[in-house]
Amino acid sequence: MSADARIIHPLWLRLTHWLNAVAVLLLVTSGWRIYNATAFLGFSVPAHITLGGWLGGALAWHFAAMWLLLANGILYLLLNLVSGRLRRQFFPVSPRQLLRDMGAALKGKLAHADPRRYNSVQRLAYLFVMLDSIVLVLSGLVLWKSVQFPLLRMLTGGYEGARQVHFFAMAGLCGFIVVHVAMVALVPRTLLAMLRGR
């Protein structure tokens, strides 16, 4: 078997994955600091797990990481589309197979025999995070430049609606991260594959 045949994740995928991870970490922690400036949902995030030190600093971090996520996310989606990986790895998602895999996952019996193939739960989770990231970017545009994006502002329920959409989309992303890290802890070879490709 050639070295290329053993590659689970190509270099472009590993690089975009880790750049997205850095961007998301910066965005979430600076976003929590920005949220704390108004705490419009009635609670605050502990300051020691936020980034930026003050509102202006948090905004600077958030905007810098926003461009990294946007550019890297577009590159990730384009490379997945052009290479055919998006179709091969994430589709189809069969409702019957999804229910079967979810049942196996809840019992702790979901197989990971071939790390090159995603099961239905993984496919749905990755598709969710792609769509959730798009919602985050679009609602973030409303918060950043509300006047310049009137259609997006209307679709998200106005500026206040966009704040809630953005916050709950971020919460969904954080939920994905928690499950993702837990799964990596249960199947550590997936981390090695994302670090070295095989």
Image: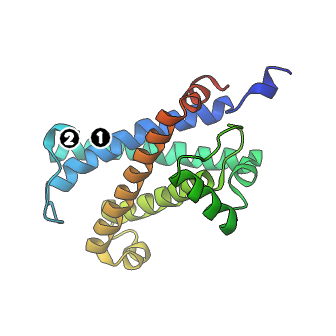
Quarter of the rendering containing residue 151: bottom left
Which residue matches tag 2? 57
Amino acid at dot 1: Trp
The reply to whether residue 52 is visible in this rendering is no
Look at the numbered discs 1 and 2 and tell me whether their residues touch, using CB distance below 8 Å: yes
Q: Secondary structure at mark 1?
A: helix
Amino acid at dot 2: Gly
Q: Secondary structure at mark 2?
A: helix
Left or right of residue 60, residue 11 in this image: right
The residue closer to the viewer here, 186 or 27, is 186
User: Residue 143's x, y, as percent?
Assistant: 31, 63
Question: The C terminus is located in which quarter?
Answer: top right
Left or right of residue 67, residue 146 in this image: left
The residue closer to the viewer here, 119 or 123, is 119
Which residue matches tag 1? 61
Left or right of residue 50, residue 169 in this image: right
The correct choice, above or below, for 134 with respect to 21 in the image is below
